[in-house]
Image: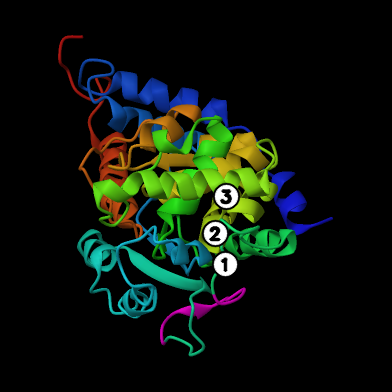
C-alpha cells in the first residue's frame, strides 16, 4: 500500500460528540447565542478535529514549500525566476512577509525545497528537492506521475514530522515565481471553466498580459488533457511540486486530526487536489483569507470554505495563514475563558 493510500484510509469524519459539547458550551457563554460568529464556529470545528472538548492551539508552524516552474519561459510572470532562490534564503531569517508576521504571532516557519532551480543547499531550508524546476506544462506534462506522487508524499512526511514534535496547528505556504499559473490551471480543470475566469496578475503581471497568461494555461490543458477527477493526474499534467506538497500536508494533518490553515490562491489549488484525492480532508481545513486573485472565490466555493479575513493580500509564502493564527488562538481563548450563565448570576 502506498503512503497516500495509507494516509487516506486514516482520514475520518469530525467527531460530532465533541462538536456538540463545544456548541453547548458556546450557547451557555454570557453572550447572545451565535453573537461571536466565526469565533464560535472555529472552536466548534476544532473540537471536532481534535476529538476533545478542550484543546491547545499555542504551538503552531507554517510549512512552506519552494519550487520553480518550467512554464516561466512562456512569459507568465513579471519577476526574474531567481527571486525564488533569493527569497527562499530569507525564510530562515524570518525577514520576509511570512517570517515577520510569524514573529509577531509567535509561530515557527519552515521552508522545504522541493524544486528550486539551484544546485547549492540553502542554510536553514530542508532539502527535499525532487528536481530543479518542473517542466514547461505548455509543452507537455509538468512532471511525471511518480514525481507528483513524491511531491504529495513529501508533504505528508513533513506534516507528520512536525505533528510528532507536538505542533498543534499547521499552516501551509509556498514560494515560487510563476506558480499562480499552474494554480489557475488546476482550478480551471477541476471547476470546468475557461482559464480566463480564474487567471489573475499574480505577483504583478501587467493587465495587458493576462490574456496571454490565460492562453498559456488553455494551451497546457489542451495539450495535456488532465483528468478532472484524478487529483494526481491533474498535479502531474499542470501542477507544481510545492502545490503537491501542500496537498500532502493537508492529507497528513487530516489523518492525524490536526487543523491545517490555508493561505491564499496557491494553497486553494493544493486544497482542491487534496479534496480530489480524499473529500473528507475538507473538514480539517481552516481558510484564513480571501486571496485577491480572481479565481479565489470560485475555488473556495467549490470546497464550501469561507475565510474569516479579507485583506486584499496576494503575497503568498504562508503570510495569510500566519496572520490567521491569532484569530484561531483568540477563538480558543474566548471559548475556554469566557464565563457561562451557570457560573454567574445574570438573571437568565
Task: Give percent across and percent down for residue 64.
Answer: 43, 64
Residue ID for mark 3: 220
Residue ID for mark 1: 134
In this view, the residue in front, 54 or 152, is 152
Horizontal side, residue 312 vs residue 305: left or right: left
Question: Which residue corresponds to the image point at 29% horizontal and 57% vertical from the top-left?
Answer: 203
- The answer to whether marks 1 and 2 mark residues whose Cβ atoms lie closer than 8 Å is yes
Q: Is residue 111 above or below residue 9?
A: below
Q: Which residue is at the far bottom?
A: 120
Q: Secondary structure at mark 3?
A: helix
Region rendered in magenta: 123-132
Question: Can residue 104 be seen by looking at this rendering?
Answer: yes
Spatial distance from mark 3 to mark 1, Cα to Cα?
13 Å
Task: Give percent across and percent down for residue 99.
Answer: 27, 68
Q: Main secondary structure of the magenta part?
A: loop
Spatial distance from mark 3 to mark 2, Cα to Cα?
13 Å
Spatial distance from mark 1 to mark 2, Cα to Cα?
6 Å
Could you say which quadrant of the image residue 334 lies in?
top left
Residue 164 is one of the magenta-drawn residues: no
Question: Which residue corresponds to the image point at 56% horizontal and 63% vertical from the top-left?
Answer: 136
Amino acid at each position: 500500500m502506498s503512503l497516500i493510500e495509507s494516509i487516506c484510509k486514516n482520514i475520518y469524519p469530525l467527531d460530532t460528540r465533541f462538536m456538540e459539547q463545544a456548541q453547548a458550551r458556546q450557547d451557555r457563554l454570557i453572550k447572545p447565542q451565535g453573537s461571536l460568529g466565526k469565533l464560535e464556529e472555529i472552536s466548534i470545528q476544532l473540537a471536532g478535529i481534535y476529538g476533545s472538548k478542550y484543546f491547545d492551539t499555542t504551538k503552531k508552524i507554517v510549512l512552506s514549500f519552494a519550487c520553480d516552474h518550467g512554464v516561466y519561459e512562456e512569459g507568465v510572470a513579471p519577476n526574474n525566476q531567481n527571486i525564488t532562490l533569493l527569497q527562499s534564503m530569507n525564510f530562515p531569517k524570518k525577514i520576509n512577509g511570512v517570517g515577520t508576521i510569524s514573529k509577531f504571532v509567535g509561530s515557527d516557519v519552515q521552508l522545504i525545497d522541493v524544486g528550486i532551480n539551484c544546485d547549492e543547499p540553502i542554510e536553514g531550508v530542508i532539502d527535499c528537492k525532487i528536481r530543479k524546476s518542473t517542466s514547461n506544462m505548455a509543452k507537455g506534462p509538468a512532471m511525471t506521475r511518480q514525481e507528483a506522487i513524491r511531491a504529495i508524499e513529501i508533504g505528508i512526511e513533513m506534516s507528520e514530522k512536525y505533528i510528532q514534535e507536538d505542533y498543534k496547528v499547521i499552516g501551509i505556504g509556498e514560494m515560487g515565481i510563476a506558480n499562480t499559473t499552474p494554480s489557475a490551471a488546476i482550478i480551471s480543470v477541476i471547476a470546468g471553466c475557461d482559464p480566463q475566469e480564474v487567471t489573475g496578475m499574480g505577483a504583478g503581471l501587467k493587465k495587458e498580459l493576462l490574456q496571454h497568461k490565460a492562453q498559456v494555461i488553455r494551451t497546457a490543458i489542451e495539450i495535456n488533457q488532465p483528468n478532472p477527477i484524478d487529483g494526481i493526474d491533474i498535479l502531474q499534467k499542470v501542477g507544481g511540486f510545492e502545490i503537491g506538497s501542500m496537498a500532502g500536508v493537508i492529507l497528513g494533518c487530516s489523518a492525524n486530526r490536526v487543523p491545517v490553515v490555508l493561505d491564499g490562491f496557491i494553497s486553494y489549488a493544493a486544497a482542491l487536489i487534496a479534496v480530489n484525492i480524499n473529500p473528507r480532508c475538507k473538514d480539517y481545513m481552516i481558510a484564513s483569507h480571501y486571496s485577491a486573485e480572481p479565481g479565489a472565490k470560485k475555488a473556495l466555493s467549490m470546497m464550501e470554505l469561507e475565510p474569516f479575513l479579507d485583506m486584499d493580500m496576494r503575497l503568498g509564502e504562508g503570510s495569510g495563514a500566519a496572520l490567521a493564527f491569532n484569530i484561531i488562538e483568540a477563538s480558543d481563548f474566548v471559548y475556554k475563558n469566557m464565563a457561562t450563565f451557570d457560573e454567574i448570576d445574570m438573571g437568565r
